[in-house]
Image: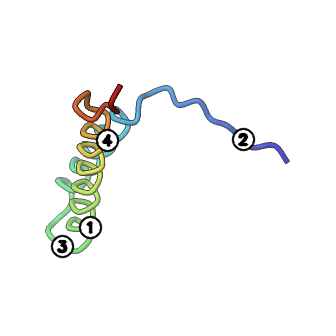
Amino acid sequence: MERRRVKQEASLEERLAGQARRLRDEAEMLPPGGERDGLIRRARQTEIAWHINEWLNSPGLAPPK
């Protein structure tokens, strides 16, 4: 069985930023409640993942030469 590979057109950072923005926009359209809180929580988690990825890819974390 062959593994199906997908070539991503956008970088991980771009996809995470877009998803966080989309989730926040969706949450703004909802009335206060559990569904809105869940979307805001997911947006915050996505933003955290985005920042962790930026931190991990920063030049300050380069391995010693």
Q: Nearer the viewer, mark 2 or mark 3?
A: 2
Q: Do the residues labelled 2 and 3 touch (CB within 8 Å)?
A: no
- Residue located farthest toward the left when viewing the structure as drawn: 32
Chain-order first, disc 2 or disc 4 = 2
Q: Do the residues labelled 3 and 1 touch (CB within 8 Å)?
A: no
Q: Nearer the viewer, mark 2 or mark 4?
A: 4
Q: Residue 38 carries which label?
A: 1
60 and 25: which is toward the camera: 60
Question: Callout 1: helix, strand or loop?
Answer: helix
Q: What residue type is labelled 2?
A: Arg
Q: Do the residues labelled 2 and 1 touch (CB within 8 Å)?
A: no
Question: Callout 4: helix, strand or loop?
Answer: helix
| Residue in the picture at 34% in, 41% down | 16
Q: Nearer the viewer, mark 4 or mark 3?
A: 4
Q: Do the residues labelled 4 and 1 touch (CB within 8 Å)?
A: no
CA gap, disc 2 to disc 1? 32 Å
Q: What residue does disc 4 label?
A: 53
| Residue in the picture at 21% in, 59% down | 40
CA gap, disc 2 to disc 4? 25 Å
Q: Which mark is residue 23?
A: none
CA gap, disc 4 to disc 3? 30 Å
Mark 1 Cα shell of 10 Å, populated few (<14), some (14-19), many (≥20): few
- Residue located farthest toward the right when viewing the structure as drawn: 1
